[in-house]
Amino acid sequence: MKYNRRLVCLCGTPPILKISWTNDNPGRRFLGCRHYGSLFQNPCKFFDWYDPEFPRQANTVILGLLKKTNKQEKQLKCRWMLKLILGINLICNLKNHQIPHVH
Ligand SMILES: [Zn+2]
């Protein structure tokens, strides 16, 4: 196959997996030149999406979560995660209680 995905970028080094944080593609992974954005003299423009395009709905959710976590302090982030975990546990427990037991 002539048009296989290139695993060596134009610099001759393997590209690295990075995560995009743009509004259009938040959290989407791509392969890029490892020299890009560094002080390397002449980085190439190698770029190839690794993940398929996310549905618009998923992008909205990811952006919403990013906004939340950006605003909060580290400590608050931990509390938020804890609340989330507790919430999931609670839902699981409620579900277990709601299942009628047949004796
Ligand atoms: Zn390169």
Image (spheres, helix red, strand yellow):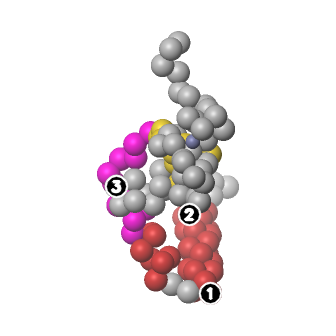
The residue tagged 2 is: 95
State which quadrant residue 7 falls in: top right
Q: Ligand 1 within 8 A of label 1's CB?
A: no
Q: Nearer the viewer, residue 60 or 21?
A: 21
Looking at the image, residue 12 lies above or below residue 19: above
State which quadrant residue 57 falls in: bottom left
Q: Ligand 1 within 8 A of label 3's CB?
A: no
| Residue at x 46%, y 83% (from the top left corner) | 71
The residue tagged 3 is: 24
| Residue at x 54%, y 48% (from the top left corner) | 42
Give the extent of the magenta segment.
52-64
Tag nearer the camera, 2 or 3: 3
Query: Which element type, helix, strand or loop, lies under badge 1?
Result: helix
Marks 2 and 3, how far apart in space?
Answer: 37 Å
Tag nearer the camera, 2 or 1: 1
State which quadrant residue 96 falls in: bottom right
Looking at the image, residue 66 lies above or below residue 3: below
Mark 2: few/some/many CA within 10 Å (<14, 14-19, 20+): few
Residue reaching furthest to the front: 41
Mark 3: few/some/many CA within 10 Å (<14, 14-19, 20+): some
Q: Nearer the viewer, residue 93 or 35?
A: 35
Marks 2 and 1, how far apart in space?
Answer: 30 Å
Position in image of residue 94 (x %, y %): 56, 69
Q: Is residue 76 visible?
A: yes
Whether residues under marks 2 and 3 lie with C-beta atoms below 8 angstroms apart, the answer is no
Q: Amino acid at mark 3?
A: Asp
Position in image of residue 38 (x %, y %): 58, 58
